[in-house]
């Protein structure tokens, strides 16, 4: 396979990547045939996957605007993926030019493309790091040089926690990040779940199996399990709800049924 000019040296073009699959769902161009094939196999079971990802992005934009309305102008987006239209820095900086954004991802394609997109933007940066190692993220010079952790930060964990297995101890990783943030900080989360998917669990489970086969298990958690990630933070109304139900900007009745898959919520540190 010929390596595209945008693909960093050393990446395995034969292995699917969840960030490139996500890019494909959103209509992006930074993915390989191996990613598209995995996505198509998952969509055989769960055809609404692109709509679920679009709902994720729409929630993220609403949550970023909410954080700005509450005076939070610093953003830490972990598991940020490959930049597409309407990314955090575009939403935040179009509303407040002083907003600062740090992206974090462990996929080299996501990191390389983020660096290219952010070139010349002095208030945004990207860190190559993994959510499983929060101290490496917090100590990264790109972060310490841009964000002031003595002031409120909006921490985004959008469509990433469900790729951490229980053996990775995601609760501990999130707790370490939560504890490092100043009072007034926000935690913005979406998480995959069987709840809300307009299909029976067995059918939806076929898509989950595809992710397991490509060695990126998709861990479906229930409401109470996801709520635990917000321990120590006060939930912002309307609480932990289906993505389309979190402060919608259009009538909920008009939403695609797949937009109600999984959970979304925002918490604030007292």
Image: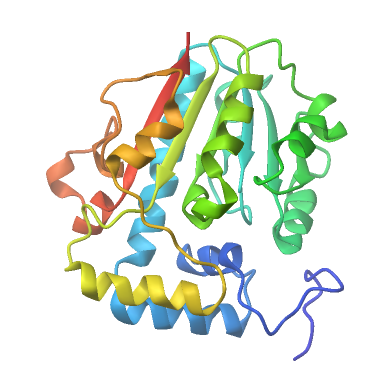
Q: Which percent across, then down, holds residue 128?
A: 78, 49
Here the colouring is rainbow
- State the residue at coordinates (83%, 39%): 120
Q: State left or right for residue 249 relative to residue 126.
A: left
Q: Number of numbered discs present?
A: 0
**Residue furthest left in the image:** 253
Location of residue 180 with respect to 133 vertically, above or below: above
Nearer to the camera, 250 or 34: 34
Q: Which percent across, then down, holds residue 41?
A: 41, 83
- State the residue at coordinates (17%, 62%): 198
Q: Is residue 120 visible?
A: yes
Q: State left or right for residue 9 relative to residue 260.
A: right
**Residue furthest bottom in the image:** 1
Q: Is residue 28 visible?
A: no
Q: To which quarter of the image does residue 199 belong?
A: bottom left
Nearer to the camera, 11 or 136: 136
Q: State left or right for residue 127 relative to residue 262.
A: right
Location of residue 46 with respect to 270 vertically, above or below: below
Q: Which percent across, then down, holds residue 145?
A: 85, 25
The quadrant in which the N terminus is found is bottom right
Location of residue 148 with respect to 52 vertically, above or below: above
Q: To which quarter of the image does residue 33 belong?
A: bottom right
**Residue furthest front in the image:** 167
Q: Which percent across, then down, holds residue 131?
A: 65, 45
Q: To which quarter of the image does residue 6 belong?
A: bottom right
- State the residue at coordinates (79%, 57%): 112
């Amino acid at each position: 396979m010929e390596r595209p000019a945008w693909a960093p040296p050393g990446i395995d073009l034969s292995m699917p990547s969840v960030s490139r699959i996500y890019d494909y769902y959103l209509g992006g161009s930074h993915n390989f045939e191996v990613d598209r094939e995995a996505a198509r196999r998952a969509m055989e079971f769960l055809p609404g996957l692109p709509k679920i990802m679009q709902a994720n992005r729409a929630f993220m934009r609403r949550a970023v605007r909410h954080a700005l309305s509450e005076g939070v102008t610093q953003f830490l987006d972990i598991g940020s993926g490959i930049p597409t239209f309407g990314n955090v820095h575009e939403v935040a900086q179009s509303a407040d030019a002083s907003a600062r954004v740090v992206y974090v991802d462990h996929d080299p394609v996501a990191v390389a493309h983020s660096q290219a997109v952010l070139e010349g933007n002095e208030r945004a940066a990207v860190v190559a790091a993994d959510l499983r190692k929060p101290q490496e993220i917090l100590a990264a010079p790109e972060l310490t040089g841009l964000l002031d952790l003595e002031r409120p930060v909006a921490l985004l964990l959008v469509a990433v926690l469900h790729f951490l297995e229980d053996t990775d101890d995601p609760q501990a990783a999130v707790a370490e990040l939560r504890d490092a943030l100043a009072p007034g900080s926000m935690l913005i989360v979406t998480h995959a779940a069987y709840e809300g998917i307009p299909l029976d669990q067995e059918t939806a489970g076929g898509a989950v199996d595809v992710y397991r086969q490509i060695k990126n298990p998709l861990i479906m958690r229930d409401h109470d399990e996801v709520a635990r990630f917000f321990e120590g933070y006060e939930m912002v109304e309307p609480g932990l709800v289906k993505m389309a139900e979190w402060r919608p900007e259009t009538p909920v009745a008009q939403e695609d049924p797949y937009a109600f898959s999984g959970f979304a919520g925002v918490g604030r540190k007292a």
